[in-house]
Image: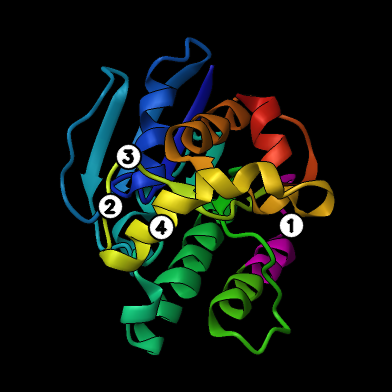
Amino acid sequence: MVEVVMLGASGAVGGAALRALAGMPEVGRVTLLNRREIALPGPNMVQHVVDVGDPGSYRHLLAGHDVAVCALGVGEPSKTPKDVFVRVDRDYPLAFAQACREAGIGHFSLLSAVGVSAGSRFLYVRTKGQLEDGLRALGFARLTLFHPSMILTPENRYGPMQGVFLAIWPWLNPLLAGPLRKYRGIRVEDLGRAMAVEAACGGTGEAVLEWDDFQTLT
């Protein structure tokens, strides 16, 4: 039985991963660290309302878990002040990972993004890349980095621009072939299930997972 602790379960991908974890017999306790209470889809789940920016508020809850899943992130980076985006998408997850490593958790799984690079001149991909480099330095026995492109949600959560992307991306998918396959859109439920399945798989080393890998897992 795998024991999972999760940060970011209230978001679209985190919620999808949570629902998938609830139906997996190989998953035991699931501990959620949330900014607010959410509905729990399974009886094996417990949630704690914490300050996600302060590891001191949740460090005592980490011991005994096998896997940490982080799906924390800003919903609309383009409409968020740069300092807030960097704090939520890099600093908070890295502090969570540090606390997990100190608690003896061997597997860390992160919802990141396709094409990230710490050397990029673009804030979004640079920040995500810096986070991944920071995670590598912590020396987890297993580090899983999920790199989706467009995440296809059933509803438009963020306004007209996302509405356009949600409408056209499924039509673009067949055109994205060869090395462009990693940019195919992925349904949020499929991505969440892939994260849940991978959390129960075990293994060692680093894995960077993209569109084809999500299909294999689901």
Residue 31 sits inside the magenta stretch: no
Residue 135 sits inside the magenta stretch: yes
Report the magenta residues as a range: 132-143
* Residue depth check, mark 4 versus mark 3: number of the one nearer the observer: 3
Q: Looking at numbered disc 2 in the image, what kind of residue is underneath it?
A: Asn
Q: Is residue 83 left or right of residue 26?
A: left
Q: Is residue 107 visible?
A: no
User: Which residue is label 2 attached to?
Assistant: 156
Query: Pointer 3: residues within 10 angstroms few (<14), some, or many (20+)?
Result: few
Residue 154 tag number: 3
Query: Pointer 2: residues within 10 angstroms few (<14), some, or many (20+)?
Result: some
What residue sits 26% from the left and 50% below the top? 34
From the image, which quarter does the C terminus lie in? top right
Q: Looking at numbered disc 1 in the image, what kind of residue is underneath it?
A: Gly
Query: From what the image shows, is residue 21 above or below residue 126?
Result: above
Q: Looking at numbered disc 3 in the image, what kind of residue is underneath it?
A: Pro
The mark that comes first in sequence, 4 or 3, is 4
What residue sits 29% from the left and 60% below the top? 57
Q: Is residue 10 left or right of residue 166?
A: left
Q: Looking at numbered disc 4 in the image, what kind of residue is underneath it?
A: Leu
What residue sits 79% from the left and 38% below the top? 204
User: Which residue is label 1 attached to?
Assistant: 139
| Towards the viewer: 58 or 118 | 118
What is the x, y in percent for residue 77?
39, 74
Residue at disc 1, secondary structure = loop
